[in-house]
Image (tube, rainbow, N blue to C red):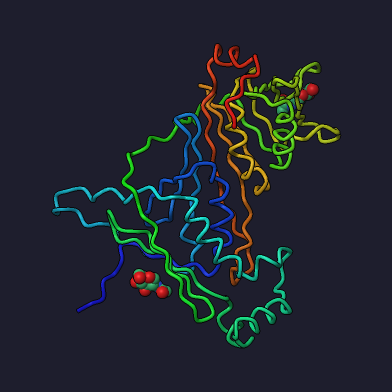
Amino acid sequence: MAAIVPMFSAVASSTRHILLLLRCISFAKKALVRISAEGLRFSTDEGSSIEAFVFLDKALFTSYTYHAPEPASSQDDPPEPPFFEIDLQSLLETLNIFSLSDLTSSTRSGGYDDFAAHRLNRHAGMNAFTNHAMGVTGVCNFSYNGEGGALSIHMFESGVTTTCDLTTYEADTVEDIPFNRDSLSVKTIMRAKFLLEAVTELNSVNPASMTVFASPGSASKPNLSLSAIGALGTAAIDFTTATSSETPVLESLYCPTETSASYPFAALKAAQRAMASATKVSLRLDDEGVLSLQFLIELEVGSSDGSGAVAFVDFRIVPLVDDEGAREHGGESTSE
Ligand SMILES: *[C@@H]1O[C@H](CO)[C@@H](O)[C@H](O)[C@H]1NC(C)=O
Ligand SMILES: *[C@@H]1O[C@H](CO)[C@@H](O)[C@H](O)[C@H]1NC(C)=O
């Protein structure tokens, strides 16, 4: 009899990049997981006003197998790919234990740190040859066997196997916050660091909301401005497309007409970890004022050809309607 083949199983030789990406959306306790032949999609949300998602492409794993559930009969459409909820904090804790001993985490600026590897090998009772031959210090195996089953994580490291079965919860099909990418009112790209600095500065006035203002360019108006009014005062950060400026620079700006919209500040705080991990961010507003922040994250995946992989973390934030913005003028805070 053939061994039972799980519906899904994937192996990663380092969980550091997975941990980095999942932490970016860890503002919520639970995450919705969708498994497909192309990869794993994790999403989190806060009510129906903030949504974040990250796609872990199968290329981020050393092996990735997914056997789609069979249709009930040949006439039926194949069943939907599995989706379920998991406790994201538990998953992060599990992966964190594994990556603590992931030696590559101590060698941020490229290059294999032989000394650290040697030390770790001695510590783990492995010889350097074994380590070089395998090229990894351990592997992490994720598997899932269909509805109601656990998401199992097996970690093999230095001869020690750790198993963790994460309970999966039945999830309602969550509709994504609609974002009309074909009808944008603003699109700009900047270094994620600039956005992080701006949000950190605005946070100092303890605001309830943040206003985005964009203008197609007049001498008296900034190209893009992020502003907030809070209990402790007002703050605004202007951005420009002019590279010779002291002001934070936008790499590109599309804005056919003057636009402004406000968002709950708590949503921007939820994205702070993504801002800190990303290199660049694409900030877009659609014609309904929905804000999309797409973060480009460079991963130091130990790929054999040395090429750097990238991943995207997306946030979508629903704008406040006008009187909500006015009500929050008093500095009433929805955060904390
Ligand atoms: C990962 O776990 C699954 C389920 O236990 C198993 O079928 C698969 O062979 C494992 N893969 C590796 C590389 O250990
Ligand atoms: C940004 O504003 C300046 C004026 O301050 C204008 O000359 C420039 O065209 C604007 N850039 C874009 C992309 O609209």
What percent of the width, then of the height, locates residue 125? Answer: 60, 86
Camera-side residue of 237 and 273: 273
Is residue 64 in sight in this rendering? no
Residues 332 and 307: in front is 332
Determine the image quadrant of residue 219: top right
State which quarter of the image contains the C terminus: top right
Q: Position of residue 247 (x, y in %)?
A: 82, 32
Q: Is residue 62 left or right of residue 221?
A: left
Residue drawn at (68%, 48%), measured in percent from left and top? 279
Above or below residue 104? Residue 221 is above
Residue at 28% x, 54% y is: 148
Q: Place residue 18 in its image quadrant.
A: bottom right
Is 27 or 258 nearer to us in this picture? 27
Quarter placement of the N terminus: bottom left
- Quarter of the image where ligand 2 sits: top right
Q: x%, y% of residue 203?
A: 70, 31
